[in-house]
Image (cartoon, rainbow, N blue to C red):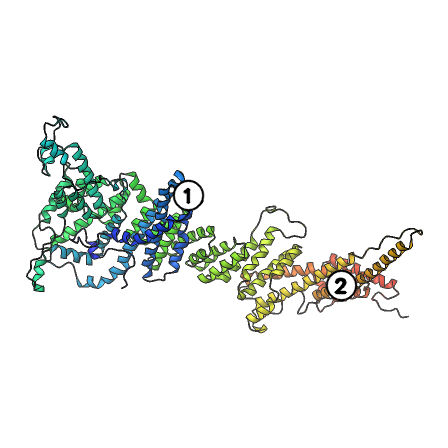
């Protein structure tokens, strides 16, 4: 089993409140903080030389770096045991941000308002750090340690009878996972303890004598400084104040209370040895001796004969621990001592009331108090059941205090203090409670409910935190309902979409099911307008393993189907494309990046061209056509290796695309012919009078000669353009393979014809034939008529009426009558030219 990279107490550390392990690691807080110290120091050094710059964001930029940094951590770690390395790295990252914010507050960056906002951010981040520590400590034990001890549990029914107190409890912690988890939570609560204002309750003094003011007053009873009438104790033994029911000197009473508070704060933070040092430093060695009485007894000399050593070894712990414990219980239960002294005794004697009276206003403190008592009861029960020794009985109230973890949390939920209830019923309290209870399914239900009901109230960093908890639980196999997990991750992806960071969006979207990742990532792509940003977004999606083909297709369809209120972007100038249409056309860029999407590109481009043709938006048609690579037909053939292997949809798309290509060529040629035909060179103005001199007459003749040459060139251009236009327009009418905008023969429709709206497409093409082909025929007739090719106009009727292509079927009666009237005009011109109505010479 690989060692955990996350700093965690070993088994001797787990037993530090029960065993005599003064040289072992103190607790979880020490190991965590020591590991983070070097990294945090380096971060602080870097931040010292950074320029704060514009701080209008009030620390927001500092905390927002967690988004990319969390992504980098997850991306650089694989599965398996790396899950716990990830937790360690996430904790370290959060701690670095906390250090930077604390430094900015200390510097006064942002003023008082900036300090308040940074403090709010710090409050959340600290709780997040605490929760990540809890996740690592608990699940490392549950996933790795408990698995390793299953074989030991099968071999041992319980601790060995007759062992020493220390041996019994060592074995108990080894095989009892529940007790071990209790201890882990206690270690976590002590590691995360924040003493606040009580951090430095003592004045800094050198080593001093205890109760020196009381001693001085007793030795100088007649002293004017104290006077008579102040009743104080008559003796200076530790029990004098209680026995005589008299106080110490007022200054000593104050120092006593301050020391009691400092000792309890050290115990609350898991630093019992520091509390002992404080007692010794301030001359109260008896208080230090009292704090030593809880240690478990073990006489190593019983094992001395095994090693063959005859030297007597020191005895560990308190051989009269049972008597000490009962006395400590009585002290905690007494009203004659201050609340901190009572609570200190209550920690080691399992007296919950003394702890609750002091720690009533904080959820974490109350949880710590309950768990300390539960551990004490279970340890004491095991000792008295397995050690062959008579013990002093404990009061019934001691044994009646046993509770389960569920009962503890139920009591916290209905605590008298409103702040405790608020935290217990708040998000962090619920998350930490379910992590401790290992009810991951209920935790996911709560988080999914928050996302559904309070999505607008959840900050981006709350969603980031919850999403990474879900990812961790999924990795270790603790997710029961994937739908709930995906709902939470999807909410976080939406936060990242608002930040427009493609790598992050793609990475976390890949953790979702295909329909959801397609929906979310396509919604992101709809917002990306710049070409370079689009390339980066697609690259990120490809690296993350997303279904890029489906995502880009959905993106183009969504943009195409988006409705814009009339007048939202104003009316475009004549001959220009509106902003919505430009956006829809440019969306085709999403389908250009991947060669395997050439068929989809043609399909979507053709759909746009059909709509724009029906709306007579020729500039949009041209722009859409230009979006398609010119060699797309050859690319599709190469993609499928040969023409015979092209699927039905792509085969129909290729022909439709070629139809539009021919149509645009014909329309553009006709527009160019019209422009040339209407721009006949203007004849120069008539010359002057007959009295003009020779120079002026020569200039006029040169102008007339230049005009005649220009007219000749114009006539030649018009003639050539007319010939080209007639050919291109005839290419539309005479389009091969069943005609213009008629699909080639395919054995059957595509398998996904329903999803493609295949029949709707066929109706659109039939409608376009009825619109475009009659217009092409009129344009063709106009070119031939104005070019003097009247016989060609008459022959056009033969092509329309031919049964080979049956073009007459696309005509309505009105349009057909219009065309026939123009052909009749051409026949009349032929008759005026002494030819028959079909353009042939008249023979008698």
**835 left or right of 296?**
right
- Seen from this angle, which residue lies furthest left? 310
**What residue is shown with label 1?**
58
User: Depth check: 843 or 546 in front?
Assistant: 546
Secondary structure, mark 1, is loop
Q: Nearer the viewer, mark 2 or mark 1?
A: 1
Comparing 133 with 564, the one in front is: 133
Q: Quadrant of the N terminus?
A: bottom left
Regarding mark 2 in the picture, which secondary structure is present there?
helix
- On screen, residue 678 versus residue 593, left or right, reads right
In the displayed structure, 217 sits above or below 160; it is above
Above or below, 641 relative to 204: below
Q: Is residue 33 something that shows in the picture?
A: yes
The answer to whether residue 479 shows anywhere in this view is no
Q: Position of residue 616 (x, y in %)?
A: 67, 55
User: Residue 676, located in which quarter of the rendered image?
Assistant: bottom right
N-terminal of the two: label 2 or label 1? 1
Residue 305: percent from left, percent from top: 7, 63
Relative to residue 158, is residue 831 drawn left or right?
A: right
- Report which quarter residue 773 is drawn in: bottom right
Q: Residues within 10 Å of mark 2 (few under 14, many from 20)?
A: many
Disc 2 to disc 1, C-alpha distance = 69 Å
Image coordinates for residue 47, horizontal then vertical, percent: 38, 49
Q: Number of marks in the image?
A: 2
* Residue at the spot 69% in from the left edge and 59% down from the top edge: 772
Question: Picture quarter containing residue 342?
Answer: top left
Of 251 and 504, nearer the camera is 251
Pointer 2 residue: 721
Residue 240 lies, with reference to residue 46, above or below; the image says above
């Amino acid at each position: 089993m690989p060692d955990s990279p996350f700093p965690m107490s070993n088994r001797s550390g787990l037993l530090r409140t029960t065993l005599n392990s003064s040289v072992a690691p103190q607790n979880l807080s020490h190991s965590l903080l020591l590991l983070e110290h070097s990294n945090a120091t380096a971060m602080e050094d870097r931040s010292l030389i950074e320029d704060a710059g514009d701080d209008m964001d009030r620390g927001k930029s500092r905390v927002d770096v967690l988004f990319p940094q969390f992504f980098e951590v997850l991306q650089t770690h694989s599965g398996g045991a790396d899950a716990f390395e990830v937790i360690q790295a996430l904790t370290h990252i959060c701690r670095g941000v906390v250090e930077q914010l604390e430094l900015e507050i200390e510097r006064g960056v942002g003023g008082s308002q900036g300090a308040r906002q940074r403090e709010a951010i710090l409050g959340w981040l600290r709780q997040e750090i605490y929760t990540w520590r809890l996740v690592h400590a608990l699940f490392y034990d549950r996933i790795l340690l408990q698995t390793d001890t299953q074989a030991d549990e099968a071999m041992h029914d319980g601790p060995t009878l007759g062992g020493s107190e220390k041996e019994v409890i060592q074995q108990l912690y080894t095989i009892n996972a529940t007790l071990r988890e209790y201890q882990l939570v206690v270690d976590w609560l002590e590691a995360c303890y924040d003493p606040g204002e009580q951090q430095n309750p003592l004045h800094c003094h050198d080593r001093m004598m205890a109760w020196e003011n009381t001693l001085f007053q007793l030795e100088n009873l007649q002293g004017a400084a104290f006077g008579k009438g102040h009743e104080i104790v008559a003796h200076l033994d530790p029990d004098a104040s209680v026995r005589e029911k008299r106080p110490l000197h007022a200054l000593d009473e104050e120092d006593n209370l301050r020391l009691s508070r400092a000792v309890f704060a050290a115990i609350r933070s898991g630093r019992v040895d520091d509390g002992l040092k404080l007692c010794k430093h301030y001359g109260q060695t008896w208080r230090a001796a009292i704090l030593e009485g809880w240690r478990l007894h073990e006489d190593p000399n019983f094992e001395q004969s095994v090693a063959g050593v005859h030297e007597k070894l020191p005895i560990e712990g308190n051989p009269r621990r049972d008597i000490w414990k009962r006395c400590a219980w009585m002290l905690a239960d007494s009203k004659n001592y201050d609340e901190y002294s009572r609570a200190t005794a209550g920690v080691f004697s399992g007296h919950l009331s003394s702890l609750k009276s002091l720690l009533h206003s904080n959820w974490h403190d109350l949880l710590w108090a309950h768990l300390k008592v539960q551990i004490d009861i279970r340890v004491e029960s095991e000792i008295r059941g397995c050690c062959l020794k008579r013990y002093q009985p404990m009061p019934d109230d001691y044994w009646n205090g046993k509770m389960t973890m569920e009962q503890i949390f139920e009591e916290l939920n209905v605590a008298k203090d409103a702040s405790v209830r608020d935290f217990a019923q708040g998000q962090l309290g619920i998350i930490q409670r379910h992590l401790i209870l290992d009810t991951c399914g209920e935790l996911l239900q709560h988080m999914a409910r928050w996302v559904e009901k309070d999505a607008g109230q959840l900050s981006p960093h709350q969603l980031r935190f919850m999403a990474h908890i879900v990812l961790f639980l999924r990795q270790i196999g603790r997710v029961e309902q994937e739908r709930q997990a995906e709902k939470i991750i999807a909410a976080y992806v939406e936060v990242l979409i608002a930040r427009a960071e493609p790598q992050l969006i793609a990475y976390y979207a890949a953790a979702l099911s295909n329909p959801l990742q397609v929906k979310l990532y396509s919604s992101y792509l709809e917002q990306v307008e710049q070409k370079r940003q689009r390339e980066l977004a697609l690259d990120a999606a490809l690296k993350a393993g997303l279904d890029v083909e489906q995502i880009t297709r959905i993106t183009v369809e969504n943009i195409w189907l988006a409705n814009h209120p009339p007048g939202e972007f104003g009316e475009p100038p004549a001959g220009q494309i509106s902003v919505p249409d430009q956006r829809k056309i440019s969306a085709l860029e999403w389908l250009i990046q991947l060669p395997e999407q050439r068929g989809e590109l043609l399909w979507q481009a053709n759909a746009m061209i059909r709509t724009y043709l029906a709306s007579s938006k020729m500039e949009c048609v041209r722009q859409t056509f230009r979006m398609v690579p010119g060699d797309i037909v050859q690319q599709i053939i190469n993609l499928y290796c040969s023409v015979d292997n092209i699927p039905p949809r792509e085969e129909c798309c290729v022909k439709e695309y070629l139809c539009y290509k021919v149509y645009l060529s014909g329309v553009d040629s006709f527009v160019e012919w019209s422009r040339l035909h209407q721009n006949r060179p203007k004849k120069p103005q008539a010359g002057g009078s007959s009295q003009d001199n020779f120079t002026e007459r020569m200039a006029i003749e040169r102008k007339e000669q230049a005009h005649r040459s220009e007219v000749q060139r114009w006539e030649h251009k018009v003639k050539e353009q007319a010939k080209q236009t007639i050919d291109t327009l005839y290419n539309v009418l005479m389009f091969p393979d069943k005609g213009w905008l008629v699909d080639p023969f395919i054995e059957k429709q595509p398998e996904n014809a329903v999803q493609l709206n295949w029949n709707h497409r066929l109706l659109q093409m039939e409608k376009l034939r009825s619109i475009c082909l009659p217009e092409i025929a009129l344009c063709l007739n106009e070119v031939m008529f104005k070019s003097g090719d009247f016989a060609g106009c008459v022959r056009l009727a033969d092509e329309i009426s031919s049964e080979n292509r049956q073009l007459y079927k696309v005509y309505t009666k009105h349009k057909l009558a219009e065309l026939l009237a123009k052909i009749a005009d051409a026949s009349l011109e032929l008759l005026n030219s002494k030819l028959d109505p079909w353009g042939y010479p008249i023979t008698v």
